[in-house]
Image (cartoon, rainbow, N blue to C red):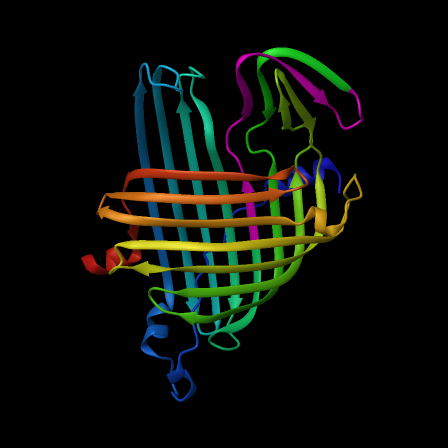
Amino acid sequence: MNRTGNRGIAMLGAAVLLLATPALAEEDLVQDKPPESKQQDEGYHWFFTPGVSFAYGHSQDVVGQPDGHTITLAATVSTGQSYRKGIHEYRDVLTIKEAFSRTPVLDEFIKTTDDFKFEALYLIYLLEWLGPYVRFSLQTQIFESFNVQPDTVNFNITYLDGSTEDRLGRRYRLTDGWMPLTIRESAGAFAAPYKSEPYNIEVRAGFGGLHTIASDQFTVSGKDGDQVSIVELDDFNAGAVEIAVGLWGDLWEKKAAYKAGAEFLIPVVNDDALDRDPGELTNMEFYAGITFKLLKWMSLDYQFKAVKQPQIVDEFQIQNNLLLTIGYSWSDADEKKAE
């Protein structure tokens, strides 16, 4: 696929996955009609949850720390919808996370989190806990990315054709807005063997396509003293095996909610320029998070994510975020309560 075609694909994405499927209850085996919990799941549902957070710190004459102010500004939006009728179910969700920080070392606001993700899932329940699925996802970042250093360094750039270039400075522009862009589509089978308020489990296995649109973009491959190594990225396409497992639930009378899981995408057929084997090119993502509801409009959130995309960076990209978030959540359940 050429680069123009790849960028065309990028404009077609819009929708997403929200892990959660009903489990097989013992009474399902003997009842002639669906249990009450299943009947309540049918129909159309939606939610919209925005939030903002702010952190401030100041240090002066503290051993091992530079004097000055540290400020972090963050915003999140999570929204989605679902529809179920009979054995058919559709779900999608959009998540946006942004954070910018200013520290005494870098006296300007620097992007520290930038995540835009759509996922969509269509399931057919051949059994109440088992059936086929089709999935689509799109993940990118919204804003341009820069590598910013506190002092002048030598940026050593390696291009795809093997040529190199050195540039002196404090800042180097790495990526455009909405780049790199990763698109996945897959189909396979899902199983949701257990569902309750505190514990829900879902497992998926399938096969599909993986497309990374990254031509004319760059990434940092390492730093040695005052030299920062930068490499040019390229587009990547593959046919891949998908394996995923998710765990989530509510605790302490819904005063806390958690989620955790892992996803693996093994590119068994690919156009890797370095001719790496599927094991070396396996995409991995591990995530975990917990939210403590302090007030209706305030929560304490911890989020962890470790992602490895060898076609972009052959190292784990790790993020830890602990935020006091001010926000609110609206859903169709709120509308029903108001009626």
- Residue 46 vs 215, above or below: the answer is below
Which image quarter holds the C terminus? bottom left
Please tell me which residue is depicted at 40% across the width and 38% down the height of the picture. 321
- Where residue 56 appears, as percent x and y from the top left, is 30, 25
The reply to whether residue 238 is in sight is no
Quarter of the image where one finds residue 10: top right
Q: Is residue 315 left or right of residue 30?
A: right
Part of the protein shown in magenta? 136-163
- Where residue 88 appears, as percent x and y from the top left, is 49, 69
Q: Does 106 lie within the magenta span?
A: no
Q: Main secondary structure of the magenta part?
A: strand
Count the numbered circles shown.
0
Quarter of the image where one finds residue 158: top right
Q: Is residue 44 left or right of residue 241?
A: left
Quarter of the image where one finds residue 27: bottom left
Which image quarter holds the N terminus? top right
